[in-house]
Amino acid sequence: DLVNVGTVKVTVTGKGNYTGSFELSYQITKRKVTLTSASDEKVYDGNPLTNSKVTVTSKLGFAEKEGATYNVTGTITDVGTKNNTFTYTLNEGTLASNYEIETHEGTLKVTPVTDKVTVKISGKKDTVTYDGKLHSVEGYEVKELSNPLYNASSIKFTGVAKAEGTDVAIYPMNLTSAQFSNANTNFANVKFTVTDGYLTINPKSINPEDEKTGIKVTKPNDTMYNGEEQK
């Protein structure tokens, strides 16, 4: 076989003025080929980062009319770094025994969003009329997110979002921006604007004309002047 890798034996035979013969041999060695998948980088956008390019990075590539087909499987969506993994299949007529193939995997990297993301949060509010019972309101609402890729599940809250009371007054939750933090590594610059929540307890009407009060007011009895304070 004068084409493929292996030992080639040659017989030299004398001709004309020469007689006799002898054998020589030489080696057809493997062709060294290096395959490298592409490296790529982008800022987080919620979509997978992929790059299907594979190149021959060695001085020598495949022999003419030979080669390989590649299946690149590397992918990354969230912030971080991963190898751009791939496999290859030699094309028809390309013999693995003729090659020494080395593979290098490129790097896929996603970096965090550094533009400021503003999150507006408002504590819940409620208003009731005094009835001698304990009332409360709790929780908060995410009113606005400046980046549509950012969502409420990325918010970490430390504290208690609750206001409660019995007597007539305004009871604040005392929410502050310091109680909210970003739990999503895909975003590096998140700011929180917080509006406090509160419970308002209004006085109960004692107007006798108001049937809803449930309070009965009895008119004092008439009395004759006697020079004393009437009670």
Image: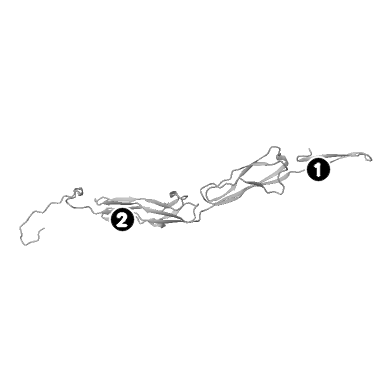
Instruction: Report x, y in % for residue 26.
Output: 81, 43
**Horizontal and vertical percent position of residue 53:** 62, 46
Q: Which residue: 29% across, 52% down?
A: 127
- Residue extending furthest toward the right: 17
Q: Please give the residue where the numbered disc 2 appears in the rendered image.
A: 171
Of the two numbered discs 1 and 2 on the same chain, state the one appearing first in sequence.
1
User: Quadrant of the image for the N terminus?
Assistant: top right
State whether residue 160 appears in this view: no
**Residue type at the position of mark 1:** Tyr
Residue 93 position within the rendered picture, expressed as x and y whole percent measured from the top left: 71, 37
Horizontal relation, residue 91 to residue 225: left or right: right
* Disc 1: which residue: 26
Q: Quadrant of residue 95?
A: top right
SS type, badge 2: strand
The amino acid at mark 2 is Tyr
- Label 1: which secondary element: strand
Colour option used:
one colour
| Camera-side residue of 89 and 131 | 89
Disc 2: CA contacts within 10 A as few (<14), some (14-19) or many (>=20): many
**Is residue 191 depicted above or below 4 in this figure?**
below
Count of marks overlaid on the render: 2
* Res 52 quadrant in image: top right
